[in-house]
Amino acid sequence: MLSPVQPNDEFPGPDWTWFESWRGVLFASARVLRIADLDMIEHDGFPLTWFDVLSRLADAGPAGLRMQELEELALFTRGGLTRLVDRIEAARLVQREPVPGDRRGVRVVLTADGRQRYSAALARHGEVIERAFGQRLTSAQHRAIADALWPWWHDADPADTAQDPG
Amino acid sequence: MLSPVQPNDEFPGPDWTWFESWRGVLFASARVLRIADLDMIEHDGFPLTWFDVLSRLADAGPAGLRMQELEELALFTRGGLTRLVDRIEAARLVQREPVPGDRRGVRVVLTADGRQRYSAALARHGEVIERAFGQRLTSAQHRAIADALWPWWHDADPADTAQDPG
DNA sequence: CGACAGTATCTGCGCTTGCAGATACTGTCA
DNA sequence: TGACAGTATCTGCAAGCGCAGATACTGTCG
């Protein structure tokens, strides 16, 4: 998919470049993610989805996050966060605690072990990404990509503006 | 995840740019894919995984593809191709046919309906990607990204060379 | 032909996801 | 206080995914 067109381009309108760039973004992320996920499972014992959650919690400070906040922040999880946290909790990397003054809610916090395992995973993950992605481009290329794609990282939800023709 | 570091960078080594560019690639693909998948389900009645398979078959010509070839080409499917094709076949978009001279194998080919539904989906998909991704960058930016990320699209499996420090 | 390694695809099964509807609690208003 | 809309999270269930082990066929060698 996402290679809707063969070498013998015919579909393209006047400027077809955006499609080649999209294809690059798509393939690069798919391949690098696959490498990183396999590596993390092998060496850290958990997949990227866990790492996603752990990193949000590590960034959040000692109070942790509510389930809703976590769901908004996590990149890889649309639903099913309850059970994802269940699994991570069963592995003793996070812990659910009551929220004072609101008996509906829970806050999810890293355990000491969770923080430690996360740090180790982070260090390794950084190296893996650097090797599989970082070192394959020049600094100028990275700069150009970072500048161009920055809005997607920054925007809360670019989907909202996708309709906007301007 | 994949935002291992907060605004208060401390982790980064001398040149941290590669990480910002990775983050951009990751977020852009995740967000755009989500938009495209939802749109396709709503308007074409099937998800991107189906589109992935259909597009490979459309590119393959009238003889279709063997399951193995399909598995190698498809971007989104690691295993479970048998059942994915089962579902698409149940929807009458593809069809399994015997391979003359090898009773183990099957070739998967598009049905007339499949080809038609694929064309419609392709047209719409192109527009969606253009709106959600293409129009948000300048032509020069797309050119730079396409040139930089081209190897990932081109290489069979960049994972193999990930070790290569050069 | 019979044994056997190799190939192509499928099946069984457990884990993960996604979504709709429960459940439990809060805050407001009469 | 009792009703009720709103919020936070969980549960049930069906669908999808991934992997290990079947199953069915092929080609080779003796």
Image (cartoon, coloured by chain):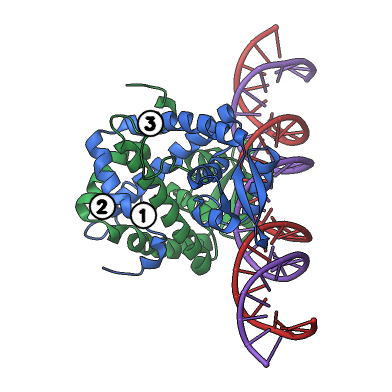
Chain colours: A green, B blue, C red, D purple
Q: Nearer the viewer, residue B113 or A140?
A: B113
Q: Position of residue B78 (x, y in %)?
A: 56, 56
Q: Position of residue B88 (x, y in %)?
A: 65, 42
Q: Are marks 2 and 3 in contact (CB under 8 Å)?
A: no
Residue A27 visible:
yes
Q: Residue at x 25, y 33 (%)?
A: B138
Secondary structure at badge 1 equals helix
Q: For the residue carrying disc 2, how many other residues have a C-alpha within 10 Å: few (<14), some (14-19), or many (20+)?
A: many
Q: Amino acid at mark 1?
A: His
Q: Position of residue D14 (x, y in %)?
A: 75, 40
User: The C terminus of chain A appears in which quarter of the rendering?
Assistant: top left
Q: Which residue is mark 2?
A: B17
Q: Nearer the viewer, residue B57 or B87?
A: B57
- Vertical side of A51 occupied by D9: above or below: above
Q: Earlier in the sequence, mark 1 or mark 3?
A: 3
Q: Which mark is residue B154?
A: 1
What count of labels does the image hold? 3
Between the residue at mark 2 and the residue at mark 3, the CA separation in whole angstroms equals 27 Å
Q: For the residue carrying disc 3, how many other residues have a C-alpha within 10 Å: few (<14), some (14-19), or many (20+)?
A: some
Between the residue at mark 1 and the residue at mark 3, the CA separation in whole angstroms equals 22 Å
**Disc 1 sits on a residue from what chain?**
B
